[in-house]
Amino acid sequence: MSDMLLSNLQTARWPKIKAPRAAGFVMLAGLAICVMIGPDLVGQDPAKQSLLSPQERPSAEHLLGTDHLGRDMAARLLSGAQLSLSLALLSVLTAGIPGTAIGVLSAWYGGWVDRGLGAFADAVLALPGLLLVLMLAAIAPGSWWALYAGISLTLWVEYYRYSRQRARIVLSSPAVEASRLLGLPVRLILLRHLVPEIGPGLMTVAAFGAATAVTAVAALGFVSVGVRPPTAEWGVMMTELLPYWREAPFLILQPVACLVITVLALHLCVGGLHKR
Amino acid sequence: MTQTNPFIAALAQRGLQAVVVALIVGIVSFAMMQALPGDAAYRIAAGRYGYDMMDAASAELVRQELGLDRPFWAQLLQWLGALATFDLGQSAVYGTPVIDEIATQLGYSLLLAAGAVVVSVLIAVPMGIAAGLRPGGLVDRVSLGISILLRAIPAFALGVVLVLIFAVQLKLFPVAGFRGPQHLILPSLTLGLGLAAVSNRVVRDAVVEAMDAEWRLFARTKGLSARLTLVRHVLRNASLPVVTYVGVQMAYLIEGVVIVETVFAWPGIGHALVHAIFGRDIAMVQGTALALGLIYVALNLVIDLACRAIDPRTRAT
Amino acid sequence: MSIVTVSELQVFAGDERLMGPVSFALGAGETLVIMGETGAGKSLIAQAILGVLPNALRMEGEICVNGRRVDTLTPAERAAMWGHEIATLPQEPWLALDPLMQAWRQVAETHVHVAGLSRPQAQHQTAKDLVALGLNGTEDRLPGQLSGGMAQRVAFAAATAGRAPILLADEPTKGLDSDRRDRVTRLLAQVPKDGGTLLAITHEASVARALGGKIMVLRKGVLVEDGETSSVLTKPQHSYTRDLLAADPVEWEKSEAPPRGDPLLIAEDLTLGRGGKILIDGLNLTVHRGERIACLGPSGVGKSTLLDTLAGLVAPMRGTLCKADGLGSHAVQKLYQDPPAAFPAHVRLGRSLQDVATVHRTPWDQVEANMVALKLSPALLERRPDAVSGGELQRLSIVRALSANPMVLLADEPTSRLDPITQKETMALLGQLTEQLGIAVVLVTHDRGIARAWAQRVLELGPQPEPSHSG
């Protein structure tokens, strides 16, 4: 899969901040602040129904209006953001740290360790990622944990492949050979050679991985095999609100906008276009 | 070193991938079966004889017959053994053989996939070439902006937006289902736009690289006209990364088929898979997931062969 | 009548003059060699004649080809001359050939589409061309399967198949070892003998000498000297020309042999190989304290593998390598062909040097002293490897290696990517400093001149095992 991705990432360096990238960081920071302090500001219970006031337009009481069951949209969107972003962050960490570590170990030791891990990674990638997440999620329907495990399982491969491929190149370079001959300890070889070489690329993998996770959660919610209603989740909200598009088009567009902004922010802050 | 025919090697590699796909699908389906609440024997007996006719004795018969009292690994082996003989079982919901269901759905899914690829090629190739011939120009920058934006919209969200605009607001195309060619337009557009969002940039990069290549200038300075250089050298060299990239996109295509079919209630395999997961119809889940996985492998094999046809280096020994 | 006339040619980037003014006139059967270091603006002359100057550059002056003024023509009109009136030999033949097309097809297509031959005629002519260039057997190969020398000859056949009377050759011998270089040079020298006009750009005096004709010496874009090649090369007037010629290793003064010390490394009956293929069979070599040994041979003969074995990086297939007692585990150090690739790319040079000094408890004063001895400014330490010239970086890598207090320095083509003048300076400084410190150097090179002038012993490695002679 990743030859193209890898060649794309090989040119990645510590970023020079440019306008689109800065916009990405600003959007991401905004999202993070909203998720952290937003619920207090809105002050509404995302689950509280009010069948007397369904599909209300935005007002002082309900900043973004209410849905078909009279629940506060702002509170539900924020609650959905918490769910998606925390899951994305967690799966990036649980996939990224071991994925990178065993990628580097694989490159460092080579031999059967490398071949075994490579075969495992190939096996995970034998199916398109979302298909695997879909099936794993189906073992325990509606479970947050199944979703999280499935996403992490598909995401680690990219860290593994990227860090292994880059580390192989770096570790076999004349520069590392020279450092070893010069007697530099392993710690310095990793710090001076490997970290600067694979750091920026890993950031890119992480940002796109987070975007993939957010998209996967919403996609599965949307096709009713992920998180279950009444949990407030963007994909689930889109399914729920789709029938009411005619009376209240502003409602269905809200979760769509949240999703697009999040993915866009993640893409922009590492340079825009992920070729996969 | 032993020389292996690279063609055979490519076939063997994809063959192995197909086996791995079948194993993963089989094991996960088995796990799904085990994870279902309640006694499996009772459930199967109820499925066979109906709730009214079923009792502890018939459940016990089922248990004996299917070996449900045997150890876990023996059941798994039996499950995978059935899969190996292409015995996909019967749908719990429809009561029909899974293989028949898939046979009817397959055509629809392939139609959608083909439609999406056609849409993406029609958009990506001209746009990519236009952008690549003048890198940094207006077309290049605009297409980059649109690509980033489109890439950020997940397929199902794009589908919803397109439905709202074209089907509901403008009433140009039908919303969902499949009753005629006009139903194909919106789903293929949804999926095709997602594919084109990235592939137009790949075309653009390939064109830029080919135009900057020293061999292109040398072909010109040895006396070939611009047109001959394009036909004899640039097109083939530029198409190689593009075709390779289409292979990378196959994962996106299969994922997209699952999601987009569901959005548009398209009667294909992906829709059936989601439906089966929702309805706990495990035989159907296994069958459809297997079919999608094998299509994925087959498409990748086609790409491998296309790359070999374009690139003589892979044929040289 | 003159075929190519260039008058008062200058090339500008904005207001800055990169090259010129130069004027010359060349007739049929004549040769002009343009000589100078990299960055001297030599290539701009060929690009201006051909009409492929980068868009950001602007030219002034007049260029006439076959009596027609060409610098005022449209790009399309100029392109129409390519292959028919002017042929060009590429600098990097590997990159200039279509990687997906067989060698013979790239020649034959010129015969068909430029010279207007029929397909059978073109095939026949292509086969003849390739045989004449000693390329029989390589017809069906792809460029990736050709050696640099072969690729240059295929490019030559493809470029000249259109029978253009003028040939521009920009650094045609770049990256070739001396045998292959001589072969390409002979090919070029044949062009004027057949009535053509040759304009060759090179930084190698030996190539200029073999081509003869007229010469122009450029320094930073400015013409410093011109005349008949033979007289300029034998009696240079300008000091820069003299430096350039003196930098040719053939002209180097033979260094004096320092007294040979105790043995440090003893290799007995070494058999080396890569990928199961035997490269060097049954080699015996003893490296003594303070001596200089050169390993000479064409590319692919196993020189680098020998160095890696001496450094302990690869194990020999057979034989033994003994280290003298008291030789620490870091007493053998290595210098690399491509200095930027030998340093961590994202780390300040000062930090790279400090790391080594710290690990080996080398006082920083000593590092600084070595830098002074190698004429390196302390300001370089603040920079990263990509912001330092190749010559400076190679000297910095000498400083770095010395900070590990080595007894043996293995140098793998340390100056092959450097300009001749820089190369001479670097090798001289390396010689001085290692002699002072009593460090043995094993130098790998493909340049016989360097090997003979710089080392006391030359170890010849060839595809067929030759008796190694010591001096």
Image: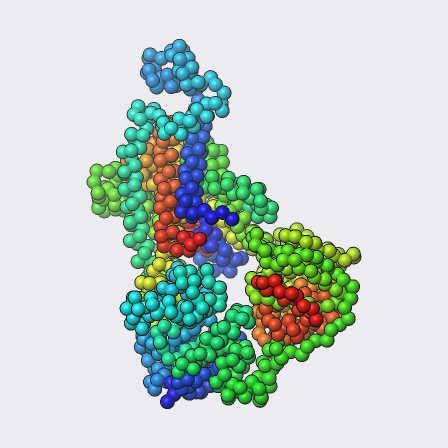
Decide which of A176, C417 is in the foreground and name it.
C417
Identify whether A225 is placed above or below B193: above
Q: Is residue B32 left or right of residue B225?
A: right
In which quadrant of the rendered image does the N terminus of chain C lie? bottom left
Applied colour scheme: rainbow
Q: Is residue C361 left or right of residue C101?
A: right
In which quadrant of the rendered image does the C terminus of chain C lie? bottom right
Residue A50: quarter of image: top left
**Percent position of residue A41, x then y:** 47, 43
Residue found 40% across the figure and 52% down from its top: B315
Identify whether C302 is placed above or below C451: above
Q: Is residue C360 left or right of residue B55?
A: right
**Percent position of residue C157, x then y:** 40, 71
Residue C431 visible in the current orientation: yes
Residue found 66% across the figure and 59% down from its top: C283
Residue found 55% across the figure and 71% down from its top: C178
Residue found 34% across the figure and 36% down from its top: B270
Residue C347 visible in the current orientation: no
Residue B26: quarter of image: top left
Q: How many numbered tags mark residues here?
A: 0
**Percent position of residue C244, x then y:** 58, 80
Decide which of B183, C182 is in the foreground and name it.
C182
Residue C154: quarter of image: bottom left
Identify whether C246 is placed above or below B110: below
Decide which of B169, A248 is in the foreground and name it.
B169
**Percent position of residue C99, x then y:** 41, 61
Looking at this view, name the residue that lies furthest to the top: B57
Identify whether C123 is placed above or below A107: below
